[in-house]
Image: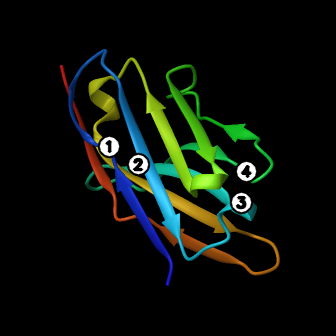
Amino acid sequence: QVQLVESGGGLVQAGGSLRLSCTASGILFSISDTNWYRQTPGKPRELVAGITSSGNTYYPDSVKGRFTISRDDAQNTMYLQMNSLKSEDTAAYYCNVKRDKILRYDYWGQGTQVTVSS
């Protein structure tokens, strides 16, 4: 059974930092691509960071230079370091583990709320 357990969300003042974690079980984490998404009510889920199984990273312009995604394959864990947080970063954040090749799968964490007060 696949499980993705997130932690690290909370309330922070604008300009502050938070680190999200997502630990996976029941999955071949090291061969998976991993992503962080966020969503606010009434809006589609937005990709905020991705790191492939080979270590290539992706960030949209909205978070580039402020967010850093990383992963520890030995611990089956992915991280999102968020610095210089803004009120517009307030959202529910979801981790995603997927594979688009042989043995395709796409799994999501339960979400963790990040609230940035201005």
- What residue do we see at 60% from left, 39% from top? 70
In which image quadrant can residue 8 be found? top left
Q: Is mark 1 on a helix, strand or loop?
A: loop
Where residue 32 appears, as percent x and y from the top left, is 70, 62
Please identify the residue farthest to the bottom as the structure is shown.
1
Q: How dense is the environment of label 1, judged by Cα within 10 Å: few (below 14), some, or many (20 and up)? A: some
Between the C-alphas of marks 2 and 3, the distance is: 23 Å
Circle 3: residue type: Ser
- What residue do we see at 64% from left, 77% from top? 105
Circle 1: residue type: Gly
Q: What element carries label 4?
A: loop
Residue at mark 3: 30
| Horizontal side of residue 18 vs 22, given as left or right | left
Q: Nearer the viewer, residue 40 or 115?
A: 115
Between the C-alphas of marks 3 and 1, the distance is: 22 Å
Residue at mark 2: 38
